[in-house]
Image: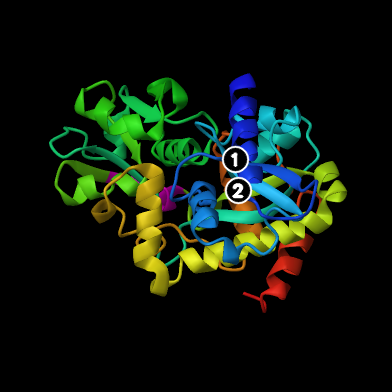
Amino acid sequence: MRIVASTAIAAFALAFAASHAASADPWKIRVGWVTTPGHMQPVIDELQKRHPELFHHFGQSYVAAGVHFQGTTPQIQALAINELEIASFGPEALALAVDNAHLDVRMIADVFQDGVPGYSSITFAVKADSPIKTIDDLKGKRVATNAIGSFGDSAMRVNLRLHGISDRDITSVEAPFPTMPAMLDDGKVDMIILVPQYEYMVKEGKYRVLFRAVQGYGRIQAVLWAMRADQIAAHRAALVDFLEDHIRAVQWLTSAAHHKEAVDLISEVTKLKPETLDFAYTKDDSYHAPDGKPDVAGTQHALDVEMKYGLIHDTLTVAPKYVDLGPVEDAAKRLGGS
């Protein structure tokens, strides 16, 4: 956590240096993220440097910078000890934050959704020549996961449970997403979560899709932004300003007119080749809400599925207690609705 805090402080120092605003004390927002381009914050950080005209309130009422985590569940502790203002939570992480960590948190905005008709769904892949042909063949095998309780991990376990495979029937190996392909190549694991930026390896014939998250969950809010209620109350006006700029950035990045530059931005941030990133922010990618609003019903559905299959042991009714869409709705209204 000291490393996380140091990284965030350094990022904010740069943000202040780059700002031309007259305000002496903007609210400092540390935003947790896991993998990009699915989590947009690192791309938006770079967009702010290239197109500051899109960010009407940056450096005035707020400054923001992303803080990297290996999964959504590690952000629970950071939020609890005030080393993070906005956490990116999967539905299971939201439930754990409330039921286990006893945090008074609120869902405030969308990060990305899975299983939306016409859009992609997170992939679970094996080697093209693997003897594993079906989910049933995973029994007794080693599977890679980024963090227990994160969206990808939960989606994997839901699909396994649908086929009668429990946690005891597999060996889970935690690893960052970028290292998973090499682990699969080296035979250290038998299946990986193949995030969209590496799906080109399926098209090249190196890997084979075994299943997708949508097969277990259906349509859900895969990752959402959450904040502590006391932080929302203390900084509500600045939060609306931040979300206004965020929505404007999301709409810019997902616009077909800016696709080439968006891909260039993502390449700069990820150091991946642009030709492998053409999927980003199109219908070949996960769905990002253009008005910033999360799918509350989709979050509840995900938790109901997780409860059914034993991923969580305490039920959580998300709305209305753990939802505050007022700031994102106010921000969207400033931009004409969506």
Q: Position of residue 72 (x, y in %)?
A: 57, 36
Query: Which numbered dot is residue 14?
Result: 1
Q: Is residue 257 above or below residue 309?
A: below
Who's the residue at 39% across and 22% down the image? Answer: 173
- Let me know if residue 176 appears in the view: yes
Q: Nearer the viewer, residue 37 or 143?
A: 37
- Determine if the magenta segment contains residue 212: yes
What's under tag 1, amino acid-wise? Leu
Who's the residue at 43% across and 50% down the image? Answer: 37
- CB contact under 8 Å: marks 1 and 2: yes
What secondary structure is found at the residue carrying circle 1?
helix
Q: Nearer the viewer, residue 218 or 196?
A: 196
- Let me know if residue 120 appears in the view: no
- Determine if the magenta segment contains residue 129: no
Q: Position of residue 316 (x, y in %)?
A: 72, 43
Residue that carries the numbered disc 2 in the rendered image: 18
How many numbered callouts?
2
What secondary structure is found at the residue carrying circle 2?
helix
In the image, the segment drawn in magenta is 210-216
